[in-house]
Amino acid sequence: MQTVSVQKALDYARLRHGIGDGSDIGRMKRHQAFLSSLIKKVKSEGMNPTTLLPLANAATKSLTVDPGLGSAAKLMDSATGLRDIGLADIKLFLTLPWRYTGERVAIVHPDADQLWAAIRADRTIDGKNAGGKRAASSSPSRTTVSGKGIRVAVYNGTITPHLGAKASAALTTDGFTVTTTAIAAATDHTTTVIRYGTGAHDAATTLARLFPGAQLVATSTPELTLILGQDYATTHPGTAATPSASSGSSLNQGARSASDDPCAKLTYG
């Protein structure tokens, strides 16, 4: 084990060829080990302004962060929240589930979908919420309207599996006639969209009551279409994408904590 700084630390983080198997996956593992060691070092010296300010200044100059963390002071406030959290409980380091397909790397589904769903729902990778309690399986309360006589095609515009089926089941319960349940042509919709043709504005407005914030778009096609966005997936996390106990356990085992030996877990397979 060595103590590295400045250029040596940068070389270690960037190095790919001539170490391990020479892959990007191996380099990511070393990135995780480096960041884990950095957190351990900072905590050992105390989570105080003297320790954190130089790090926060460097981070805000080198990283693109959310507006709420755009200054060194704000980043320091966020970092001080780690003061009372043990190193073993800081599990920030996890590689998206993957496998080799020939010489290429492919994402493993549904494991990857379950990981993203846990992050979106602010749950730990073993299915618990931020407060440490097991995530509730019940769906959030919802508005009930009468969809009698309204026909609608439902498309999942996200990568969250079975979201269309969930929405279709709820609409059927409210009396809507669901004509189609399928995956949308694009799965990167951030906002739910309701498309309606001539004479269907009232039906679209009724449908929109069940999807607050949905964007209504008039089209030349007569069909009433619902394209589910990430906003719906986020507010309705109780889908098949919620991590199961076995999946969460598997992901948890592959995660690195800040208490791990920095020389461990640098290989895979």
Image: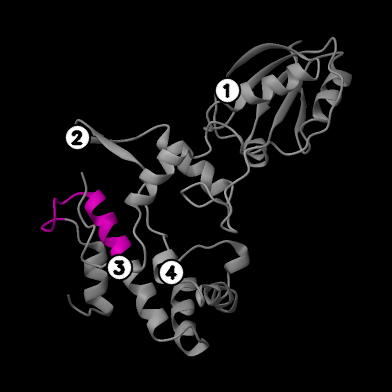
Disc 1 and disc 3: Cα gap in Å? 40 Å
Regarding mark 4 in the picture, which secondary structure is present there?
Answer: helix
Q: Does the residue at mark 3 contact the one at mark 4 (Cβ under 8 Å)?
A: no
Q: Nearer the viewer, mark 3 or mark 2?
A: 3
Mark sitting on residue 34: 3
Find disc 2 in the rendering and name its residue. 103
Q: Earlier in the sequence, mark 3 or mark 2?
A: 3
Q: How is the image coloured?
A: one colour
Q: Nearer the viewer, mark 4 or mark 1?
A: 1
Disc 2 and disc 1: Cα gap in Å? 30 Å
Find disc 4 in the rendering and name its residue. 62
Amino acid type indicated by mark 4: Ser
Q: Nearer the viewer, mark 2 or mark 4?
A: 2
Mark sitting on residue 184: 1
Give the crowd class for mark 1: few <14, some 14-19, many >=20 residues within 10 Å: some
Quadrant for the N terminus in the image: bottom left
Is residue 234 something one can see in this rendering?
Answer: yes
Please say if 205 is above or below 108.
above
Q: Observer-nearest residue: 179 or 137?
A: 137
Q: Earlier in the sequence, mark 1 or mark 3?
A: 3
